[in-house]
């Protein structure tokens, strides 16, 4: 059992396929180099002490009784609780973490924190790492049951399975993860902050998931993966539009994979634009601040720009050609490796 270690969980950007994960659809995310670092060490006693360095806040609780917490504390307590539920015997621990992914940005600082915490705690316990799909499922339970955000597994799978130079085609029905080479031929992916934070655990995200579940009930299917576009026409508004977005996003994922294989970057840019229009008009997760940010990227020469993450604020993704100058504040993102011990 090591006395101390450091774990890193990356954030993620999603090229195509938003709000498809909890509908057992397809998505095309990539892990990025920014993320969350957790430094952990074993301490005497049966207590966990967690320090959020960026916030200068501390939380303490008994290892065997993590209880509930709010904000970042829910992630730490959930990681401890879910690992113990899985049969992991955890020692007393001191945890410190900080991140380079802005909170509320739509770049999944939450999953970055979850996976880094779980890897760090497994390491302190001297436990072998389970398969990454199982780890993603455990981390998803932290988000759903402890934090209260009814997200799917896109963020966790991207953070755990990321590969340098690749996006990931994820099938959420089978949990198959296939690396897709991301050769942009001099084009750049950048994100630009809309200035508006979002929080998945409140607001519209959970409502959108509930709307999809209601659509499944009315259509008599287990998930929207089983639906076809014609079925959506018989649904009441806004359920018809929610289903239309999900089904369209699934088609765009495989079109984007083909565009990357053929190195057709203009086609990829059009698909990114189509995804944004669908998220704005059919899924209704955009805001005025997001639309202004999309326009800023397009004025800078982006051949595709869209909201990323759950919506209702956060960052906007842009695909810029080689000769374009990113707007002030834009940050280039490149595909990096998945979560790991450092």
Image (cartoon, helix red, strand yellow):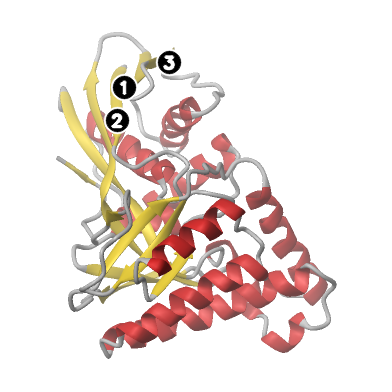
Residue 111: give x, y in percent of width and height: 41, 45
Looking at the rendering, in which quadrant would you find the N terminus?
top left
Q: CA distance from mark 2 to mark 3?
A: 15 Å
Residue 123: give x, y in percent of width and height: 23, 34
Q: Is residue 172 above or below residue 196?
A: below
Q: Which residue is mark 3?
A: 59
Q: Which residue is mark 1?
A: 53
Residue 97: give x, y in percent of width and height: 30, 28
Q: CA distance from mark 1 to mark 3?
A: 12 Å
Left or right of 129? Residue 229 is: right
Q: What SS does tag 3 mark?
A: strand
Question: Looking at the image, which residue is at 56% across and 54% down?
Answer: 311
Q: Is residue 323 above or below residue 31?
A: below
Q: Which residue is mark 2?
A: 98
State if disc 1 and disc 2 touch (CB < 8 Å). yes
Q: Earlier in the sequence, mark 2 or mark 1?
A: 1
Question: Looking at the image, which residue is at 15% across and 27% down?
Answer: 2
**Closest to the observer: 303 or 265?**
303
Closer to us: mark 1 or mark 3?
1
**Closest to the observer: 94 or 257?**
257
Label 2 Cα neighbours within 10 Å, binned few <14 / some 14-19 / many ≥20: some
Q: Is residue 95 above or below residue 204?
A: above
* Residue 28 visible to the viewer: no
Specify the quadrant of the image occupied by residue 23: bottom right
């Amino acid at each position: 059992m090591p006395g101390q270690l450091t774990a890193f969980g990356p954030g993620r950007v999603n090229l195509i396929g938003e709000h498809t994960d909890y509908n057992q659809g397809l998505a095309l995310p990539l892990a990025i180099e920014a993320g969350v670092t957790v430094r952990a060490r074993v301490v005497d006693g049966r207590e966990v002490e967690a320090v959020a360095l960026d916030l200068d806040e501390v939380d303490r609780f008994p290892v065997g009784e993590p209880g509930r917490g709010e904000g970042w504390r829910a992630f730490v307590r959930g990681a401890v609780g879910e690992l113990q539920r899985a049969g992991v015997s955890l020692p007393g621990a001191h945890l410190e973490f900080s991140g380079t992914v802005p909170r509320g940005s739509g770049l999944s600082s939450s999953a970055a924190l979850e996976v880094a915490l779980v890897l760090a705690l497994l390491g302190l316990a001297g436990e072998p790492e389970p398969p990454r799909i199982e780890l993603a499922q455990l981390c998803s339970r932290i988000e759903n049951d402890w934090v209260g955000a009814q997200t799917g597994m896109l963020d966790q799978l991207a953070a755990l399975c990321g590969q340098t130079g690749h996006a990931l085609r994820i099938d959420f029905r089978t949990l198959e993860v296939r690396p897709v080479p991301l050769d942009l031929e001099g084009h750049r992916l950048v994100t630009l902050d809309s200035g508006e934070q979002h929080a998945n655990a409140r607001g519209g995200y959970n409502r959108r998931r509930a709307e999809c579940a209601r659509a499944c009930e009315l259509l008599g299917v287990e998930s929207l993966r089983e639906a076809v576009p014609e079925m959506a026409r018989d649904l009441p508004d806004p359920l018809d539009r929610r289903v239309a977005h999900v089904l369209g996003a699934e088609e765009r994922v495989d079109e984007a994979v083909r565009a990357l294989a053929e190195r057709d970057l203009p086609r990829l840019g059009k698909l990114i634009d189509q995804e944004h229009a669908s998220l704005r008009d059919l899924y209704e997760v955009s805001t005025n601040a997001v639309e202004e940010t999309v326009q800023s990227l397009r004025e800078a020469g982006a051949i595709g720009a869209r909201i990323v993450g759950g919506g209702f604020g956060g960052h906007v993704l842009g695909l810029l050609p080689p000769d374009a100058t990113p707007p002030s504040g834009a940050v280039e993102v490149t595909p990096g490796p998945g979560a790991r011990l450092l």
